[in-house]
Amino acid sequence: MSGHGTPTPMTSHRAEPLKGTAEVPGDKSISHRSLILGAMAIGETKISGLLEGDDVLDTAKAMQAFGAEVTNHGGGNWSVHGVGVGGFAEPDQVIDCGNSGTGVRLIMGCMATSPISVTFTGDASLNGRPMARVTDPLALFGTKAVGRKGGRLPMTIVGAAEPTPVRYVVPVPSAQVKSAVLLAGLNAPGKTVVIEKEATRDHSERMLAGFGAEITVEDTDEGRVITLTGQPELKPQVIAVPRDPSSAAFPVCAALITPGSDVLVPGIGLNPTRAGLFYTLQDMGADLTFENPREEGGEPVADLRAKFSPNMQGIEVPPERAASMIDEYPVLSVVASFATGKTMMAGVKELRVKESDRIDAMARGLRANGVTVDEGEDWWSVEGLGPDGVPGGGTCESFLDHRIAMSFMVMGMGAQNPVTVDDGNPITTSFPIFEPLMTGLGAKLSKG
Ligand code: S3P
């Protein structure tokens, strides 16, 4: 839904040692895709562990509007009775994707090759984000898009009645763009080919194969070449959504910077296209271990154990790792503030077009809390102040961005003085149980 109600400030006070087990919710990327692919299969897909954050709930509503039957059975168990590839009905109403770039871009892709017209909108953050990166490749299928200046929402997409398959080299490292093109390719006859120069999260490829689509992935000199044969009959699946590494990042990082902490974060998806943060933290000297590695639902999974780590050093984060940790730079910059020496994060231009300009949002908030930050268009650096060196005491804007809000709440747990965000409401988009989960470990959060 658009908007998050009246802004509610949230403050994080120096925490007790964080102890215990943090059962974080299901993976956001996989949750969106489970609902969308479930809606495009014929028959009933059963999903357990679905993330019930606002972003995913908006996608569930959208799939209902397209004619799929989506049922919440409670406790994270959902089912989707799909209408099949090419079976979407035209929604009666505008599709409101709330805060979710993944939701809107994937849904645009999945309807782009059906003969229906759909108008999309979102909250102030989403309505400011660029959509041309998706509507440009969709135009190659014959899809039309009319939006506001700069390719912004609200926007109407007119699906191609007679789509032709496409070959598209994705110009920016974006799993959303790649996925939108693949989903559009589902209802185009023949082979759609997507090429990415940098590997991004591959949940769409894995799940399309799981649903029975003919899809191949080849590493070539040109990049990763993904070839999808259109117009398959997708078979319903039973999906156990792994817990989200991007949500696990918050209790893990909080434990690393809060004296005396020892936290177990079980069952975390460690798909290599998602796990970059954890390797970066280990490179910095974090006491972070992977226990009980296993495979669940086609994804590598492990239990993470994070302990207070007073000896972390600033590092240069390898730019080629950026795509595998793109959502984790905000909270990494908080950890970097508690390390010794400078942390350099380069090759991260994409951070400027997320739910907020995340370099700008974090730089402002870190400075308000006594941390020195330097930045350029596609890089930023943070001067670490050591394990007990972050003054805190600042108030930061969250810019309708859940990860900015949660990152500053983590900062307050280890800082000398409380850290406040002007609005904690956006947290429900991806991590609705953040507050009880963190306070259950020993965090001290207050609202209002
Ligand atoms: C996502 C892809 C990434 C990521 C987002 C989720 C996905 O966005 O930031 O939170 O599920 O495909 P980009 O495609 O813009 O990199």
Image (spheres, rainbow, N blue to C red):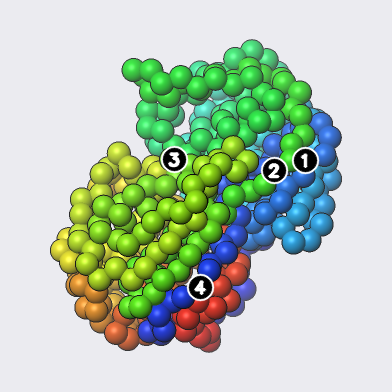
Residue type indicated by callout 3: Thr
Do the residues bearing badges 1 and 2 touch, measured as CB atoms within 8 Å?
A: yes
Residue 177's x, y, as percent?
A: 51, 36
Q: Which residue is mark 3?
A: 273
Labels 2 and 3: the sequence-earlier one: 2
Q: Which residue is mark 1?
A: 45
In this view, the residue farthest toward the front is 292
Looking at the rendered structure, the secondary structure element under dot 3 is: loop
Query: Hey, which quadrant is residue 53 in on the image?
Result: bottom right
Q: Nearer the viewer, mark 1 or mark 4?
A: 4
Q: Which residue is mark 4?
A: 20
Residue 147's x, y, as percent?
A: 57, 43
Q: Residue at x 53, y 44 (%)?
A: 294
Q: How many marks?
A: 4
Query: Hey, which quadrant is residue 298 in on the image?
Result: top right
Labels 3 and 1: the sequence-earlier one: 1
Labels 1 and 2: the sequence-earlier one: 1
Labels 1 and 4: the sequence-earlier one: 4
Q: Is residue 196 left or right of residue 227?
A: left
